[in-house]
Image (cartoon, rainbow, N blue to C red):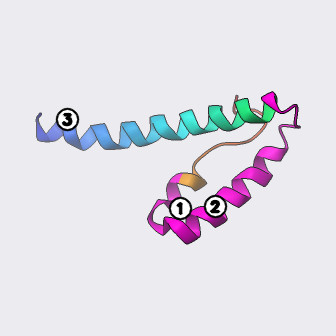
Amino acid sequence: MKKREIMFKKPFEETENIVKASYVISELIAKHSKCFGEGEFIKEHMLKLTEITFPGKLKTVQNISVSRNSA
């Protein structure tokens, strides 16, 4: 694999995972018949958890969109 390919692969995978996480959260909220406004509540708790357990990944979790219009 070329250096150029490696350089672009990681940011692409991270962006893809952020979008995937957003959809998974939206799906869970819908399956449990909750208001999509509860996404912010979930994200707040995810940020606290990440801050304690994986401080280096805090920026990634902050980028996950859980707004009503993300799905």
Viewer-nearest of discs 3 and 2: 2
Quadrant location of the N terminus?
top left
Give the number of marks. Answer: 3
Residue occupying the point 32% across, 43% down: 10
Amino acid type, callout 2: Leu
Depicted 57 relative to depicted 19: above or below: below
Image position, residue 64 (x, y; %): 60, 46
Amino acid type, callout 3: Glu
For this orientation, the residue located farthest to the bottom is 52
Q: Are marks 2 and 1 in contact (CB under 8 Å)?
A: yes
Q: Main secondary structure of the magenta part?
A: helix
- Looking at the image, is mark 1 or mark 3 earlier in the sequence? 3
Q: Which residue matches tag 2?
A: 47
Q: Are marks 1 and 3 in contact (CB under 8 Å)?
A: no
Residue occupying the point 49% across, 68% down: 55
Name the one closer to the observer, 34 or 64: 34
- Looking at the image, is mark 3 or mark 2 earlier in the sequence? 3
Depicted 25 relative to depicted 46: above or below: above
Q: Which residue matches tag 3?
A: 5
How far, Cα to Cα, is label 3 from label 2?
Answer: 31 Å
Alpha-carbon neighbours of circle 2 within 10 Å: few (<14), some, or many (≥20)? some
Residue occupying the point 42% across, 42% down: 14
Could you say which quadrant of the image residue 26 lies in? top right
Would residue 50 be found to the left or right of residue 57 on screen?
right
How far, Cα to Cα, is label 2 from label 1?
Answer: 7 Å
Q: Which residue matches tag 1?
A: 58
Image position, residue 65 (x, y; %): 65, 43
Quadrant location of the C terminus?
top right
For numbered disc 1, what is the local secondary structure? Answer: helix
For numbered disc 3, what is the local secondary structure? Answer: helix
